[in-house]
Image (cartoon, rainbow, N blue to C red):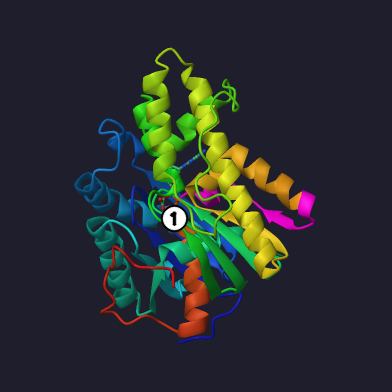
Amino acid sequence: MPDVDASTVILGIETSCDETSAAIVLGGNDIASNVVSSQIDLHAEFGGVVPEVASRAHLEQLNPVIARAIIEAGIDESRIDAVACTVGPGLIGALLVGVSAAKGLSLVWDVPFVGVNHLEAHLYASLLDDPTIEFPLVVLLVSGGHTMLVEMHAPGEYRLLGQTIDDAAGEAFDKVARFCGLGYPGGPAVEQLAVDGDPTAAAFPRAMRDQGLDFSFSGLKTSVVNFVRKNPDVSVADVVASFQAAVVDVLVHKARRAADEVGAVGIALGGGVAANGVLRAALLDACAADGRRGYVPSPEMCTDNAAMIAAAGWHRLRLDGPSPLDTGATPNLRLV
Ligand code: KG4
Ligand code: ZN
């Protein structure tokens, strides 16, 4: 295997949930292409991701998406040094589409296959946008399936500080949006409507705010439901603005405390919920007030994409070498 360096070209593949994505990344941070085909329209009519529909759409979309990523990068496929692909966590049928394709390409091209943990890849989103990032860093990873605080000392060196004990932050956004009739995906719909609402209209609970570094969001969702049932004439914009304020308050408060506890010089956001403008602004304000650097990746880097998979694959290849071809897809793969 050649040295893993700034010229190493990685094809990244992501099919863990409802985005089919392929990207070409050089040297772990130079994005030559990042093609994302979203299945949002396919799942919207069902109000959430339907696993079987997702797998079929990945099957149809993946080959053209990979072809486009290679064409947009303007490279010949013979320049690809390794194929990196999400192996978990995610939907098993969806993961298998990407993993099978990645292994097939690695065999045909005779290049290494690198299995990537999707959560680890989300941690690299900030590094992709800002290679001058400084460590130690606390990453607040908030997606549809996970809510975690991670201490990062270097690429590949991290420790889980806390996580949700029930619903993920994105899941709470999605469930509240569905209850309020705002459709799927819930996060962007809540954020948009909340612009017209009063975030102080309802005092929703901030569960476990001052307790440890774990999170709990299922009680908040129940409070929203109870509040609306008791106040049927309430403005939905006020409800979602107050809900969003409660989530952002807990997330930022805990990230700040985590950074204090581990002496972090900065806090980075990652995951789909990190696309939320109110969260981004609150985190940057908190970092400015505390004299820390705040890193908020571009919204495209927050939601699922293959550039972050290729970046994580570059670091994994450098640190551990190729993954065996009998590496399976693991739906409940953990970060650490
Ligand atoms: O990271 P991601 O694209 O997929 C997972 O790995 O889960 O995150 C998707 C989640 C969904 O729950 C979606 O509602 C949420 O991120 N999300 C948002 C926003 N954009 C996406 N949540 C709040 N505000 C947003 N603007
Ligand atoms: Zn994700």
Q: Which quadrant of the view contains residue 31? A: bottom right
Image-quarter location of ligand 1:
top left
Q: Is residue 153 left or right of residue 208?
A: right
Tell me: is circle 1 under 8 Å from ligand 1. Answer: no
- Secondary structure found at label 1: loop
In the displayed structure, 132 sits above or below 114; it is: above
Q: Position of residue 176 (x, y in %)?
A: 40, 33
What residue is pinned by disc 1? Answer: 164
Q: Is residue 189 left or right of residue 44?
A: right
Q: Position of residue 208 (x, y in %)?
A: 51, 51
In the displayed structure, 262 sits above or below 175; it is: below
Q: Quadrant of the N terminus?
A: bottom left
Q: Position of residue 15 (x, y in %)?
A: 34, 56
Pick whichever, 234 or 332, lies toward us: 234
Q: Is residue 293 left or right of residue 86?
A: right
In the displayed structure, 277 sits above or below 290; it is: above
Q: Which quadrant of the view contains residue 201? A: top right
Name the amino acid type tagged 1.
Thr
Pick whichever, 85 or 71, lies toward us: 85
Q: Position of residue 91 (x, y in %)?
A: 27, 56
Q: Is residue 94 on the magenta stretch?
A: no
Q: Is residue 8 left or right of residue 95?
A: right
Q: Is residue 290 on the magenta stretch?
A: yes
What is the number of callouts on the image? 1
Residues in magenta, as a range = 289-303
